[in-house]
């Protein structure tokens, strides 16, 4: 045991343990269960550890590794201090022998630690003793994020499989398992190799029994002798399931086939019986493949062969947009000769007043609140802010949803592949028009949620409801530039998805031709060509709307700053951002020609039911006034913001958007001024609130 003692003296000079908490989420406890040492008989013939290594534990704590004089790898016991004894599990062969993770140590405190091996008969080797100190340190890397899209899959052949998306910089993965989901986590599989493709699947070789079973996945990177671990994924739960379908309603286009996997028990829906209430409208085979045959509605049912359990879903085939109610007259008329839109009734005051709104969202709770029993009526949600919006010559916002009736709405299928699916009734567009919106920018990370045809349907619906649009297109021949003339001032508008957002990766299977035609990803060369095309149409002032940044992050990223500088240098006059779901700061970006280009990095969510993070209901309306000076140059003569907020309820209206102004004080809660102050703090001191 001489080498054992010498090594421990060397170990004491280093910081060996970590007590970390990743992203504010409590990591799983690996504290083993206490044991009674009196239950074990000491047997000096059992192998003892010849060498022991102690290093920072990747979950926060101490990881202990040891080598044995023979190939035997008995279990071990760890004792910390005089009273705390724990039984350890062998985690994995780390290239030097068995490994054990010890958690729950207090940072900076020194502990007496003893280790011994134990065989199946309960006989133990003598204790080996040393001191360890729990100190700050660790092996987690900031650039190695946790595996995401963690999905529990009930496979057709195997009881429990886990599927997740591979990280490019991960060399392997670990899967941890627990019977409670709270403690007693054990390493179910270490070093799952990272394959060449983008997906990793691991199947639990053990019979899950009654269940439930809980799993965690984390990635690791090996560089020589160094191992870097990520934080853990969210807990993945597997349990024996009654017969069920994933949704109760869905929509598919005519002639399209979709597969709906029913779940039952541990394996996925083998031997189930599928039927359709109207096979002429929607047929189904015994594998759950549903095909739209004719426009209409059918109920698809699935049951166990003995009829003891059954579930069903309603399927809309080629659902049509609701009948349009009367809409206000369109404010702009297209001039085919010049390829621009002119204000129908131009003001004689020689100024153009613009309002720019943030994300226009229509999510599950909003749809539920808007349901009338026959269709969705979103107009009340905008009724309290309509007078503000109608005062502008042009009101624009970012349409953060598809409006494709042939595909499932968010309330029917809110997620797919671990990502939100944003699609709503086209009646949402009618509510926007009725509230005073003239234009929607459409290039955002949800463009590809339901495929190419859904994106094209959304463009069609915008035109049917009389909304000007840019950022999403139908064909190569379509004009990708948008110029509006207000009071003789020509305003060019562009919209791009950029800064790493990139359509949530859902365009990966699209043909290159469709990506380049329908979507509008930011590229400096494309932006340069587009800005030049706007100038050739006589644009006096160019507004660029960017979908960029990091969701739920107030901090502006380096990528946002870089793209803003590029756009300023290319000739943009004003930049407005969306996507982070929080208000970000307003700044002035200095272009290469000396101009100071205004940039609001994120306008926030103009209307939404999101509330997981503070500030997700906040937004600003940017109010721009453009005028032409005596030399003929168009100037930004006024520039201010109007703080806004979406309330759970205002004046009896659910999810109502309201400006936080004295004029609306009787409709606002008592803390509205506090909310307003927080929004203005986010925008910074370079922009002032609008004072009418």
Image (tube, rainbow, N blue to C red):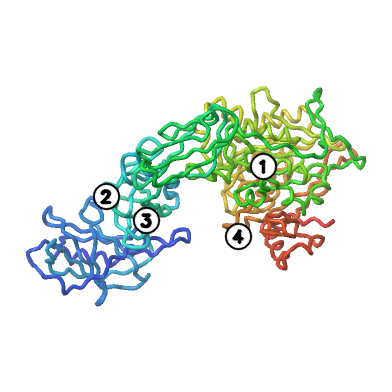
Of label 4 and label 3, which has the lower sequence position? 3
Neighbour class for label 4 at 10 Å: few (<14), some, many (≥20)? few
Q: Secondary structure at mark 1?
A: strand
Give the number of the mark in front: 4 or 3: 4
State how far apart marks 4 and 3 are (Cα): 31 Å
Residue 300 horizontal side relative to residue 648, left or right? left
Residue hosting label 2:
207
Instruction: Name the quadrant containing residue 127.
Output: bottom left
State how far apart marks 4 and 2 are (Cα): 43 Å
Residue in front for this viewpoint, 659 or 58: 659
Give the number of the mark in front: 4 or 2: 2
Q: Is residue 690 above or below residue 451?
A: below
Neighbour class for label 3 at 10 Å: few (<14), some, many (≥20)? some
Residue furthest left in the image: 45
Instruction: Name the quadrant containing residue 591.
Output: top right
State how far apart marks 3 and 2 are (Cα): 34 Å
Give the number of the mark in front: 1 or 4: 1
Of label 4 and label 2, which has the lower sequence position? 2
What mark, if any, has residue 139 been given in the picture? 3
State how far apart marks 1 and 2 are (Cα): 48 Å
Q: Is residue 4 above or below residue 487?
A: below
């Amino acid at each position: 045991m001489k080498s054992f003692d010498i090594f421990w003296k060397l170990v004491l000079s280093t910081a060996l343990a970590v007590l970390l908490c990743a992203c504010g989420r409590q990591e799983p406890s690996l504290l083993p269960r206490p044991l009674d040492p009196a239950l074990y008989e000491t047997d000096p013939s059992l192998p003892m550890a010849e060498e022991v290594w102690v290093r920072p534990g990747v979950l926060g704590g101490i990881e202990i590794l040891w080598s044995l004089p023979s190939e035997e790898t008995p279990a071990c016991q760890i004792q910390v201090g005089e009273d705390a004894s724990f039984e350890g599990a062998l985690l994995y062969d780390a290239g030097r022998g068995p490994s054990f993770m010890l958690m729950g140590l207090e940072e900076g405190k020194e502990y007496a630690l003893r280790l011994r091996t134990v065989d199946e008969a309960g006989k133990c080797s003598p204790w080996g003793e040393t001191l360890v100190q729990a100190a700050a340190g660790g092996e987690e890397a900031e650039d190695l994020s946790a595996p995401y899209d963690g999905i529990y899959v009930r496979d057709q052949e195997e009881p429990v499989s886990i599927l997740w998306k591979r990280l490019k910089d991960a060399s392997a993965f670990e899967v941890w398992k627990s019977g409670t989901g709270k403690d007693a986590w054990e390493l179910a599989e270490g070093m799952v190799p990272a394959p060449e493709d983008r997906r990793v699947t691991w199947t639990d070789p053990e019979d899950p029994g009654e269940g439930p079973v809980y799993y965690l996945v984390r990635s690791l990177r090996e560089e020589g002798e160094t191992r870097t671990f990520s934080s853990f994924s969210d807990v993945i739960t597997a349990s024996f399931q009654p017969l069920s379908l994933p949704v109760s309603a869905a929509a598919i286009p005519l002639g399209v086939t979709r597969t709906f996997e029913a779940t039952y028990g541990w394996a996925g829906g083998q031997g189930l019986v599928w039927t359709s209430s109207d096979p002429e409208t929607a047929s189904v085979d015994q594998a759950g493949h549903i095909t739209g045959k004719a426009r209409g509605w059918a109920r698809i049912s699935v049951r166990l062969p003995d009829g003891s359990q059954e579930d069903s879903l309603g399927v809309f085939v080629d659902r049509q947009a609701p009948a349009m109610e009367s809409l206000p007259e369109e404010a702009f008329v297209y001039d085919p000769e010049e390829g621009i839109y002119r204000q129908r009734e131009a003001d004689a005051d020689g100024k153009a007043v613009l309002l720019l709104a943030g994300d226009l969202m229509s999510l599950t709770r909003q749809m539920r609140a808007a349901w009338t029993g026959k269709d969705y009526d979103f107009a009340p949600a905008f009724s309290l802010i309509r007078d503000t919006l109608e005062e502008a010559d042009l009101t624009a916002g970012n349409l953060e949803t598809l409006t494709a009736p042939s595909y499932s709405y968010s309330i029917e299928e809110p997620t797919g592949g671990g990502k939100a699916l944003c699609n709503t009734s086209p009646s949402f567009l009618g509510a926007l028009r009725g509230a005073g919106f003239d234009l929607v920018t459409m290039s955002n990370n949800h463009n590809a949620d339901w495929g190419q045809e859904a994106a094209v349907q959304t463009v069609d619906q915008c035109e049917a409801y009389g909304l000007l649009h840019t950022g999403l297109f139908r064909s190569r021949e379509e004009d990708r530039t948008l110029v509006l003339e207000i009071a003789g001032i020509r305003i060019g508008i562009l919209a791009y998805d950029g800064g790493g957002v990139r359509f949530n990766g859902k365009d990966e299977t699209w043909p290159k031709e469709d990506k380049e035609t329908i979507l509008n990803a930011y590229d400096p060369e494309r932006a340069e060509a587009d800005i030049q095309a706007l100038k050739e149409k006589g644009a006096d002032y160019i507004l660029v709307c960017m979908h960029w940044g990091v969701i739920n992050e107030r901090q502006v990223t380096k990528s946002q700053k870089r793209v803003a500088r590029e756009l300023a240098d290319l000739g943009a006059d004003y930049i407005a951002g969306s996507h982070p779901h929080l208000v970000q700061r307003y700044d002035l970006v200095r272009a290469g020609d000396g101009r100071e280009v205004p940039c609001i990095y994120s306008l926030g969510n103009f209307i939404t039911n999101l509330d997981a993070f503070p500030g997700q209901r906040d937004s600003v309306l940017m109010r721009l006034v453009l005028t032409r000076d005596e030399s003929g140059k168009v100037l930004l003569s006024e520039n201010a913001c109007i703080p806004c907020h979406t309330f759970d309820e205002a004046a009896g209206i659910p999810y109502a958007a309201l400006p936080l102004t004295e004029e609306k004080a009787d409709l606002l809660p008592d803390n509205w001024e506090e909310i307003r102050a927080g929004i203005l703090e986010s925008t910074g001191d370079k922009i002032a609130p609008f004072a009418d």
